[in-house]
Image: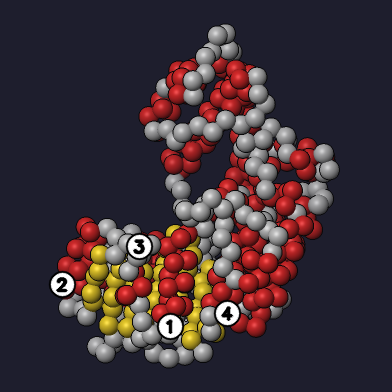
Amino acid sequence: MTTPRPLESHQLLSRFQALDSFLREHQQLWRPRPFTELALPWEAEHPALATWLRQRSLSEAEAAHNHPEQLDAPAPFPALALTAMQLSEVGELSTIAVPTASHRLNVDVPGRKWQQIEAFASHLNFSAHPRHWLDWCSGKGHLGRRLLQADTQQLTCLEYDPALVEAGQILSQHHQLASLHHLQDVLAEGADRHLSSEHTAVALHACGDLHVRLIQLASQQGCRQLAIAPCCYNRIRAPHYQPLSVAARASSLHLSIDDLGLPLSETVTAGARVRRQRDESMARRLGFDLLQRQLRGIDEYLPTPSLPVSWLHKPFADYCRDLAALKDLHIHHAPDWDALQAKGWQRLAEVRNLELLRNLFRRPLELWLVLDRGLYLQEQGYRVQLGVFCEQPLTPRNLMLLAERQ
């Protein structure tokens, strides 16, 4: 088996078009959300697969969550899994030798985050040596300080939280590094004044509109190099996705906020306690969902607000009564609370297993989104590489765009 390679500029469009065709052809499989619909449209067309998934346990769903492509499920699951894997195949970007950091630099940085910074830094294989780093949405500037290697290099950090700007400036001064920390909302007017053709702009997991804004402004201002690991594609102000590239704008694939959340459904970091709380919260919501359908006489999902963890300490009956009151619903009968709670847990197992089909499309959709960004940069005169910078267990958001002015 050949080792996958990063995608080069001349490969971006063909891969995008193949993914676009795959996602459009199978929209009826990945758009419907099992959490909000009691029966999914595709179940009538694929009854054997639906029955097989619905009969599985919650623990079986959890075991397959990160690698649904490995399931021995009825058709059309195996063929879809194979195509999704082939279309999502992207190799690791080439690495560079990065001088060992002073241990002082990772003080106050969580271990997993520091590992991500190290992995990001080791894949910045530009053809020309960066002269002036620009750390976009920098927080305290940990990434930028890690990249600052030579005395001839400079660092500018942009951050909108005043406390983080101040803390970052203190840290840079403590380490005697040539770093400037600016208070700047990067979505606001005037952010472009911080970018120039001298800059190598970097963004590690800047969410949604934040990294898109960097791509647009850096292109306008002629930044010589960019390195971006996107995150949280659904964190946008628009009511639906705004395509960037010519190819994406021409596509008939129109993405909602819910659609954009699909790539983010893969998790690798939650601890056992957090997972238990998440499961109980979802099981209770699914139990309440059955109740609210009865109360309203309407067989459709009713969105409910985010609730404090303390609500999980309430008896289930009180939980439902209080949530019903929040939604102006009146409970006039005496439900069988134990049976309703049990049905909530049963639905959770079914939902998680039905989601395994939808999850086959997580990576194809994410790669479609990142390729849209890469194609846009290519249209602006950049040579672009797209690859991974770390293994999936360190972060599922491990795709990275490297762009250099031609």
Q: Which comes before the other along the chain, label 4 or label 2?
A: 2
Q: Are marks 4 and 1 in contact (CB under 8 Å)?
A: no
The numbered disc on residue 174 is: 2
SS label for mark 2: helix
Using the image as rendered, state which of residue 118 and residue 150 is in the foreground.
150
Q: Amino acid at mark 1?
A: Gly
- Residue 55 lies left or right of residue 101; in this view the side is right
- Position of 242 compared to 299: left or right? left
The residue beneath circle 3 is 188
The part of the image, by quadrant, that contains residue 139 is bottom left
Specify the amino acid type for callout 2.
His
**Cα gap from disc 4 to disc 2, whole angstroms:** 42 Å
Circle 4: residue type? Glu
Residue 197: x and y in percent read 38, 85
Mark 3 neighbour density, 10 Å: few (under 14) some (14–19) many (20 or more): few
Q: Residue at x 59, y 13 (%)?
A: 336
The residue under the point 65% across, 24% down is 298
Residue beneath the point at 47% across and 66% down: 212
x and y, in percent, of residue 12 in the image: 64, 76
Which dot, 1 or 2, sits closer to the camera? 1
User: What whole-number distance in Å separates the C-alpha atoms at marks 1 and 2?
Assistant: 32 Å
Cα distance between the residues tagged 3 and 2: 30 Å
Look at the image and tell me whether residue 93 can be seen: no
Dot 3 lies on which element?
A: loop
Rendering coords of residue 299 (x, y %):
67, 26
Which residue ends up furthest to the front in the rendered image? 189
Element assignment for label 4: helix
Q: Is residue 154 left or right of residue 35?
A: left
- Nearer the observer: mark 4 or 2; the answer is 4
Q: Which residue is mark 1?
A: 222
